[in-house]
Amino acid sequence: MFMHNKRLQYTVRVSEPNPKLACMLLEQFGGADGELAAAMRYFTQGLAEEDPGRKDMLLDIATEELSHLEVIGSIVTMLNKGARAQLTEQQSSEAELYQMIGASGTSAKEAILFGGGPGLIDSAGVPWTANYIDSRGEPTVDLRSNIAAESRAKIVYERLIGITDDPGIKEALGFLMTREVAHQKSFEKALYAIEDNFPPGKLPGVEAYANMYVNASQGEGDMRGPWNSGDQWETVDDLNQVLPADPGGDGTASVGLGPSDAGALQMMTARLKSDPDADPMTGADLGAGPGAGRTSKGDQGGASDIHSASRRADSLTPAE
Amino acid sequence: MFMHNKRLQYTVRVSEPNPKLACMLLEQFGGADGELAAAMRYFTQGLAEEDPGRKDMLLDIATEELSHLEVIGSIVTMLNKGARAQLTEQQSSEAELYQMIGASGTSAKEAILFGGGPGLIDSAGVPWTANYIDSRGEPTVDLRSNIAAESRAKIVYERLIGITDDPGIKEALGFLMTREVAHQKSFEKALYAIEDNFPPGKLPGVEAYANMYVNASQGEGDMRGPWNSGDQWETVDDLNQVLPADPGGDGTASVGLGPSDAGALQMMTARLKSDPDADPMTGADLGAGPGAGRTSKGDQGGASDIHSASRRADSLTPAE
Amino acid sequence: MFMHNKRLQYTVRVSEPNPKLACMLLEQFGGADGELAAAMRYFTQGLAEEDPGRKDMLLDIATEELSHLEVIGSIVTMLNKGARAQLTEQQSSEAELYQMIGASGTSAKEAILFGGGPGLIDSAGVPWTANYIDSRGEPTVDLRSNIAAESRAKIVYERLIGITDDPGIKEALGFLMTREVAHQKSFEKALYAIEDNFPPGKLPGVEAYANMYVNASQGEGDMRGPWNSGDQWETVDDLNQVLPADPGGDGTASVGLGPSDAGALQMMTARLKSDPDADPMTGADLGAGPGAGRTSKGDQGGASDIHSASRRADSLTPAE
Amino acid sequence: MFMHNKRLQYTVRVSEPNPKLACMLLEQFGGADGELAAAMRYFTQGLAEEDPGRKDMLLDIATEELSHLEVIGSIVTMLNKGARAQLTEQQSSEAELYQMIGASGTSAKEAILFGGGPGLIDSAGVPWTANYIDSRGEPTVDLRSNIAAESRAKIVYERLIGITDDPGIKEALGFLMTREVAHQKSFEKALYAIEDNFPPGKLPGVEAYANMYVNASQGEGDMRGPWNSGDQWETVDDLNQVLPADPGGDGTASVGLGPSDAGALQMMTARLKSDPDADPMTGADLGAGPGAGRTSKGDQGGASDIHSASRRADSLTPAE
Amino acid sequence: MFMHNKRLQYTVRVSEPNPKLACMLLEQFGGADGELAAAMRYFTQGLAEEDPGRKDMLLDIATEELSHLEVIGSIVTMLNKGARAQLTEQQSSEAELYQMIGASGTSAKEAILFGGGPGLIDSAGVPWTANYIDSRGEPTVDLRSNIAAESRAKIVYERLIGITDDPGIKEALGFLMTREVAHQKSFEKALYAIEDNFPPGKLPGVEAYANMYVNASQGEGDMRGPWNSGDQWETVDDLNQVLPADPGGDGTASVGLGPSDAGALQMMTARLKSDPDADPMTGADLGAGPGAGRTSKGDQGGASDIHSASRRADSLTPAE
Amino acid sequence: MFMHNKRLQYTVRVSEPNPKLACMLLEQFGGADGELAAAMRYFTQGLAEEDPGRKDMLLDIATEELSHLEVIGSIVTMLNKGARAQLTEQQSSEAELYQMIGASGTSAKEAILFGGGPGLIDSAGVPWTANYIDSRGEPTVDLRSNIAAESRAKIVYERLIGITDDPGIKEALGFLMTREVAHQKSFEKALYAIEDNFPPGKLPGVEAYANMYVNASQGEGDMRGPWNSGDQWETVDDLNQVLPADPGGDGTASVGLGPSDAGALQMMTARLKSDPDADPMTGADLGAGPGAGRTSKGDQGGASDIHSASRRADSLTPAE
């Protein structure tokens, strides 16, 4: 059960309204790594958690993230307060309001659709979605996702701190950013308090593939590091070889079809077969116009054509 | 630059078609932790990575994930091959086709919309979205996200292995699952090959908040563990106290408004003020019908009403 | 600031696991009219509300909705608990697990992706989105949206109560449903405690159009009622007449273009003009195959063809 | 069956092109409260409505909203006409076109992706989604949603009127805004023409909870008003008490598990238990770098650190 | 199986950073007609294709599109490189960074969320979705979709070429644009190499409707062209006539209901019937305030009211 | 301006209710290739079209598609009518209703959320989105997209016809399917009535790349056909060669950075460099548990392990 106190967890003092900055800060209100995502990630995990210690921790942090949602939403509200009142009461001229709210598509949406209240959208105006939540119902997985999520939230706050010089906002963002660091530490502790947490889940991997590194990107820039070299790793450089543990494998895909399926498949294939020897006239041929062959092989233009062509009408007549 | 060889990275042998199982496997084709998400996560990171070693690793693994996308997509294709041909050629009766493809909304969508080709949807038919990708352009963050993503992919494969007894599918899924374990190990190595990777980013936290644990969920079930106790932690149990590092803080939000904004705000507030002493007639009062007071205070029903009420028409006349 | 107590607002007693029913109940966890939508609708309004009475009410109800989210999520968790453990520990055979979780695409997603933890998805597996929130930053609008939202939530709970006979679930849903009724009443009171709340907003309408009813759907079934007849209404039945208040209006759209724009427009129009007298050969003509005219005018088939055609291969040769 | 006349319902006279204003107006074309949402809300309700009077009304208004979609789309088209022709024919320099279409991400998308034709996107470029439609197939609910939707559309038009001084646009928007007011009145009449419309649906609420007000947000700012005080209401201030109508309730969640489920659950819990007494080394500890303890307890920095730190490289070496 | 070479398919030389232009170019990275959509459209088709020739072609082109994704992503990365480093290292003042990244909501999201790495979003910041892929598992359909998709990609590149004068970018975009033209030609050849490709699919149409043109939009502007006139077409101008091939049709919808369904329907209809003769008081009546009738019929304002009203407070008192 | 007649364009006679079939048919109501997508595709094109002939055609067909939306929506409504009334009036037992609506996640959503009214969702319950509309504001592009869209709609109707044996539904679907064929023919005529329509748009391609075919997928299965062989084509088989028209190209990406940007970049790179010679302990090492090396190189398991392991608890102790 939740309770609320109208006092914020951290005091918010904004120097002056700034609807455009408000929209940037929405990244942490309704954005991918914002506070709602954090709160809901831990809350849904907490509901299903069986371990009493982790359950308590998840609900502690989920609840605190809701308080952070309130802090960041309050900053956004303060930054929008002037424009909101002006637009609502239409006390400025149309031209002034147009300037005030038109800094970006997001600021227009914030003012016109949300009336300056904090919308659960990100800095580009995209609505929050539960796709941002990656809880998977397995603690050795979810705790790693939580660690990563806190890292992401931390860096987004860091960037926001870098773009504003309002001291009150900077302080509040600093508080929020630091709490993410603390939460990351808690989740790290909880992960390693599970004795055997790697690989995550219950099933061991297939040994033959667990230490294989596939050098799939080659050419200049091929590098070595602890992620692909050393005793632990067996590197596959020749991609054309059949993997040792795929005995008899030929890299094809097959399925056992019954006679009815096989018959239908044969019928479909016959009906839709392409004729490799055809040289059919096509819709593009029909459409290339009387000057034809505009892009035909005989035309020996070059890359530089594009520059002049894009500006000269005559270049549009085909293949002079 | 990418190149392709029509040979799969791992051979796929499916025993027999099964469109419903195909839809479950779509979770790893077009789902949140599927192979497209993996490939695009590492590919977009690789494009912007400045460190040559990590760039190579990211492109190696991104490329391999594309090959995995092909493997899982090939399994899906095999499982759908019979139903696809039957539906296309309409060689079964309507009733048979209705059964064959109607196991779930997803299998209907797979057959009717995608014609049995692998759609970039998840096991519920929801289309893939780039919201699944959480690259943030900072290696100390992204590597943690990659570690978590590999964990998630691992557990999803583990679950899929648990629901099928087709040995060919089980083997291929085992291969794919294990590769996620190997990739996780590579990303772990790459993270710790950055000397100073915690906290992520450049900005240190505000010291006063970095070791504070907020006990926001209380009551029975309050627990201790390494995530909130021990030398490292200062726990806040009394949520009503002002945080020590919020000097002079009173938990309010404020903004400095100029006279024009303040005037408009005052006008808005006056126009929209609520009257606390009113007892207005409302639309609900109008709509409660002649029997009125159906839910009014005088009615002394109880929780048990709902059971009988939901089945008896006469219970719909108000609570007499 | 939020606080949490691990005690639920309403006790949850589930008779036995049922993952399929769990998915139906997700409609009120991560669905359009579910508890998260309710909580976030009122919370975002509360943050920006200037009237202290309404602000308090919005935060009261937002907070209670979070507690409801916890109740419904707990029911879902209980219903999934058995399947979750079985799948995680793989203590049932593959065939049993396949049956257990494969009732629908949603139940597969719930088990495979979310591991049986409550996902913020609806009964079809579609993730929650902030598009469900329609707060507009104007109390005379938002309170009407809140009234409607509570109505919607009420009817969804009513339907869910109708499909389950587990008494513990039925009771908890009855509690949640009734709270929506109570919230609707509070929002009604708050709306009518604003003296002048219709039309919403500040701008009066244009009088000439405010009582006009456009009879845009005609033919059999044209009806009268208080929504289009009586003293208040002026009905427009002849849609071809110019509206009285559109003086000189001719129903066209125009814009004043400068010479540069006008020139470019003329050039574009000339380049792309269609020839009304052409009878061009088309791609469809090319593609209709040697039997040609398969759908050409001369073919005098009829609606009944489709039934036989769909089952007979020979009907596929064109126009027998 | 629909028919169309190329004459608009209201004449559109735009003074001069303005692609940025066009994007703001898209809010009512492809936005959440725009005309497509309105048309589809009433159209889908009308299809399923059994009452002939309401069915006619819903189809009347749905059809008129389609005509409004055409009006607002025509304004957008006019505002874009110049930029569209310029970009298509590339009659301006690159720099001029870059300025012309680059006012916001939305205006870039409108020009580059949609070629200046009206896209079904909102003012931030987010595509329209049927999530905006909240029809629920129950008239006492849907009519309330329609009333709210018309209110929302009205206020959005009001705001758009406030930001433009083009008299032709202002007039057309005034017409559209006023029609929303008229539609709201029709829906109100239709709601109250159903004798017993509250609570919506068929099931009465559980009496014990229908007049309860939960004071979930407390502390300074706790207020009274007709929504929570007066004879009708019973207010719960002490959240820790068990609700009277939850007899024997203890606020826990439980489910009856069979032996197989219980066994699997026990196995899962044992495997994943956390050790409350551990003080494990974690990944964060590994990653904190040689300067270690950068955020450790001993560091006695303060909130002010963040300001200097964010600008000074040396502050990045830990707080020593 | 995919392989990668770190050399790009086309060399990228960007003159100078420009984060705003980067965002416009995202249209072809993570936008609707961008390279990921192209690659995945052909790749998913290729997986399910049975014809070996088309399968090879689809995989050839899918793979090349991945290489194009890399080229356009590399341009975006180069354009962002300066801002990325500045923001990461916070080497510019807050005000400078605010300007640098705040050109639009998209550029803010690109910098703050993605850290300047290329996000899979479009020019408005909307994330890529598999809804952009329209593969349908039928070659005579999919090849037409591919032809159209290449056309769309071509025109988007053309527009992007028109807005930048950086010669290196212009050249690379010219290369990418031209490759779309070449791909379109390949798909045209493949379509017409299927002997009988129109109508797509297997089922012939119902002859009576295949050449009918319904003149559903009438009034001034009714035109003739090869799409609706000539020997092939039978035009229906009188929309009120029953279609010849709908014998006995009366334009109604009906369903056979059993007695139980019919009974429930009758009960529902009775409960929810509207009273056509009512003139109920409504919530709008309650809410219109003491000045009442603000929009009532007696008020004889006109369209011009809106202009003055929107700026004068006194105009808000009703209908002076 | 739109008008409506309550008569359907085609009479709908449904034999009996079938909520599950209703959900499959939703594919053409609220699905990707459904009638709303068609109507909106042509309507938005029509609004911006300058050529009067094409404008008329687009509005004719857009309007007819709205009438088709009504027909398919009416079928869905009829199929749901019984379940809707039963659920609304709760005239069946809970168990019966649970069965009736629980066939899939979609049918549950259709009943519980939409109350049996037709929702704008597809057969999997995914809401309609304007992402399905690919209008680009250029007739030579849009007409190709329209041709493709009609092809897609045709094949989806064909599949739906194949799964139902209700003669009334089959007839109505046959009508709708055939109209798509007729529309495709109209769009083909309109495309080729533009004299010069290929390549689409204004800019010619760069000649050197317009006839190049890149053989990017190689190995067994490499095929020839008119799409890559013949006089028109120059095939690139050696992917490692620099393209002839990329003179001096080396396949790298570069940007000119000013000194400030370059300095920040250097600082960032130094701070985040990875140490290729490190062999750091990682979080995975910490987490691998006391049995360690569970997936370490020394373990010589094989692919077959996975089968037994997944069922035996003892296999979970590492590498016995």
Image (tube, coloured by chain):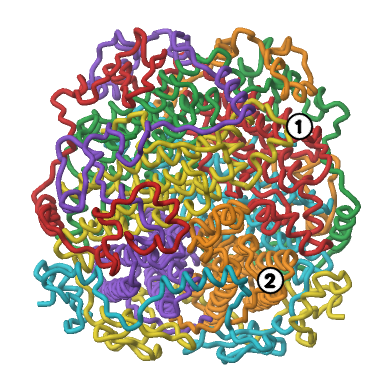
Chain colours: A cyan, B orange, C red, D green, E purple, F yellow
Residue that sits furthest to the front in the current view? C320
| Nearer-the-camera pick, D208 or C62 | D208
Classify the position of the C terminus of chain D by image quarter: bottom right
Q: Mark 2 lies on which chain?
A: D
| Nearer-the-camera pick, E80 or F168 | F168
Q: In this view, does D232 lie to the left or right of B71?
A: right
Q: Which amino acid does the dot numbered 1 rest on? A: Lys
User: Percent position (x, y) of residue C158?
Assistant: 66, 29
**Image height of A57 relative to F319, above or below:** above
Would you name the residue on which mark 2 appears? D287
Separation (CA) of disc 1 from disc 2: 51 Å
Q: In this view, does C96 lie to the left or right of B190?
A: right
Can residue D270 be seen at all in this image of the molecule? yes
Q: Which residue is drawn at 18% across and 32% down?
A: C251
Is disc 1 in contact with disc 2, using a CB cutoff of under 8 Å? no
Residues packed near mark 1 inside 10 Å, few (<14), some (14 to 19) or many (20 plus): many
Q: Are marks 1 and 2 on the same chain?
A: no
Q: Residue A261 carries which label?
A: none
Q: Nearer the viewer, mark 1 or mark 2?
A: 1
All told, the count of numbered labels is 2
| Nearer-the-camera pick, F139 or A141 | F139
Q: Residue at x 34, y 34 (%)?
A: D1
| Nearer-the-camera pick, C144 or E184 | E184
Circle 1 — which element?
A: helix
Q: Which amino acid does the dot numbered 2 rest on? A: Gly
User: Percent position (x, y) of residue A128?
Assistant: 53, 48
Q: Is residue A242 left or right of residue F182?
A: right
Would you name the residue on which mark 1 appears? C170
Q: Which chain carries label 1?
A: C
**Image height of C52 relative to B225, above or below:** above
User: Percent position (x, y) of residue B277?
Assistant: 59, 11
Circle 2 — which element?
A: helix
